[in-house]
Amino acid sequence: MLDPKSPIAWRFAQMNERFASAKAQGLYLYQQEAEKIDGMHVTINGREMLQFASYSYLDLLGHPKIDAAAIEAVERYSSGTHGVRILAGTIPLHTELERTISEFKHTEATMVYSSGFVTNYSTIAALVGRNDVVISDKLNHASIVDGCLMSRAKFVRVAHNDMAALEKALASVPPGKGKLVVADAVFSMDGDILNLPEVVGLCNKYEALLMVDEAHSVGVIGETGRGIEEYFDLYGGIDIKMGTLSKTIPSVGGYVSGSEELITYLKHASRAFIFSAALPPAQTAAAKAAFEVILEEPERVKRLQRNVEHFLTGLKARGFDTLNSVTPIVPIIAGDDERAWLMAKLSQERDIFVLPVVSPAVPSNLARLRANVTAGHTIEEIDRAMDVFAEVAKEVGVL
Ligand SMILES: *Cc1c(COP(=O)(O)O)cnc(C)c1O
C-alpha cells in the first residue's frame, strides 16, 4: 500500500496535478484517439485534420503491398510466435527480414528485436560493462541514455555534435578500457544530422566502437534513402548500425546490423533478444515488404526531400526559428511551454494536427511545435500548414 507521506506518493501527486491543470485549461493534447487514418489525413473527435505529427516519413502506412504481406503472414503463421527467438520463436520470415536489412545497410548480418527502444537499451548493455566507457551525445534518444545507465559502464555525456568535446572525452579514457561512442544519426527533437565524417575519424584515431541510431535516417536521408552513410557517401565507419521498424518502416520493432562476429555475440549476450518474445509474423512480414518498397519506389524519397526543402524554406521565410534542422523533423520554436501548448491547440482548432514538445524533453526556453513533414503531403497542404503556423504564432506572440 502506498505511504501517502513517501516520495513516491509525492511524485504521483506532482505529475497528476500538472496534467489536471493542463486538462482544465483545455491544453492537454496528448493521447488523442485517431478514429480514422488515411494517408496524411487523420480524424479525431469526428474532425478531419492534416497530419503533421507522423513518423511515416515515406507515407508507407497503408501501402497495399505491405498490408498484404502482413495479412498473408497472419494466415500462414497466426498472430504470435512460440516465444523467444533463441528457443522456439524463430520463423523463416525473421531470417528473411534480417537478410533484407543486411542488404539494405550493406552489412554482413542483422538481428531484429520486438521494439526499437529495447534494441538500444539491450544492445548497449550487452556491448559495454563495468570496465568500459560509453560516450553519448547530450541529445541522444532516451533509449540510448537508459542503455548507457543500465550497462554500468562509465557514462560520459558530451555537448551536442561538438567534435572538440568528443575528442576530449575519448582522449581522457584511461588505457585498457573498452570504448563505445553512440549517437543518433538524425537527432529526434532538433532534426539535425550527426557529423559522421569527424565522428568516424575520431573513433578510428582512438580505437573506439561506433554505434549509430538511424531511427530517423533510414528512408529519410541519402539519395535513395539508405541513411546517413549514403548521405555523407562514407561507408564502413559505423560498427553497429541500429534502426527502428516503427517509423519510416510502418511496423514495430528494431534491428542491429553489423559484422557477423558482432551479431553472433549479441544474439547470445543481449538480454532482450534472449528473454523477450520474437517479433510477431505480421510485423516481420510488413517490415520486410517496406524495405523492398523503399527501393522499388524511389520517387517517395525524392518527394520527401523536396517537401523538406519546401517546408524549411517556407518556415524561415515566415520568420520562424527551426534550429539546424535539415530533415523532416522540424522544430518550430515557441519559447516557453505555455506558448508551445497554445500554438499546438490553436493549430489543431484550424485542422492542422501538430504536437508540442516541452520541458523536460527539451530545454524550457526552447519549447516548440515538433512538425513532421512527409512524402505524403502535397505542396498545397504544406503551404496551408505553414500559413496556419504563422497565424497562430502571431496570435500568441511568437512572431
Ligand atoms: C523512436 C526512437 C527509438 C525507439 O524506437 P521504437 O521503435 O519507437 O521503440 C530509438 N531511437 C530513436 C532516435 C528514436 O527516435
Image (cartoon, grey):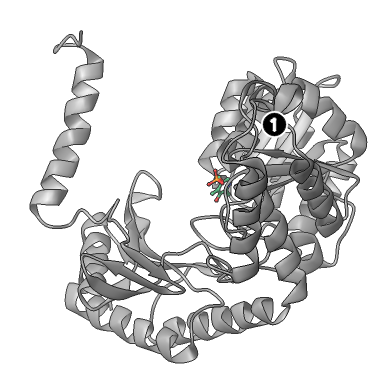
Asked if residue 169 is positioned above or below residue 314 in the image, the reply reads above
| Quadrant the C terminus occupies | bottom left
Q: In this rendered view, identify the residue nearer to me: 263 or 144.
A: 263
Asked if residue 324 is positioned above or below residue 10 in the image, the reply reads below
The answer to whether residue 94 shows anywhere in this view is: yes
Q: Residue furthest front?
A: 75
- Write the residue at 35% across / 62% down: 368
The residue at which mark 1 appears reads as 123
Residue 375 rendering spot, x and y as whole percentages: 56, 77
Residue type at mark 1: give it.
Thr
Residue 376 rendering spot, x and y as whole percentages: 52, 78
The answer to whether residue 240 shows anywhere in this view is: no
- Write the residue at 62% across / 82% down: 303
- Write the residue at 60% across / 70% down: 64
Asked if residue 52 is positioned above or below residue 357 in the image, the reply reads below
Residue count near mark 1 (Cα–Cα under 10 Å), binned few <14, some 14–19, many ≥20:
many
Q: Indicate the secondary structure of the residue bearing disc 1.
A: helix
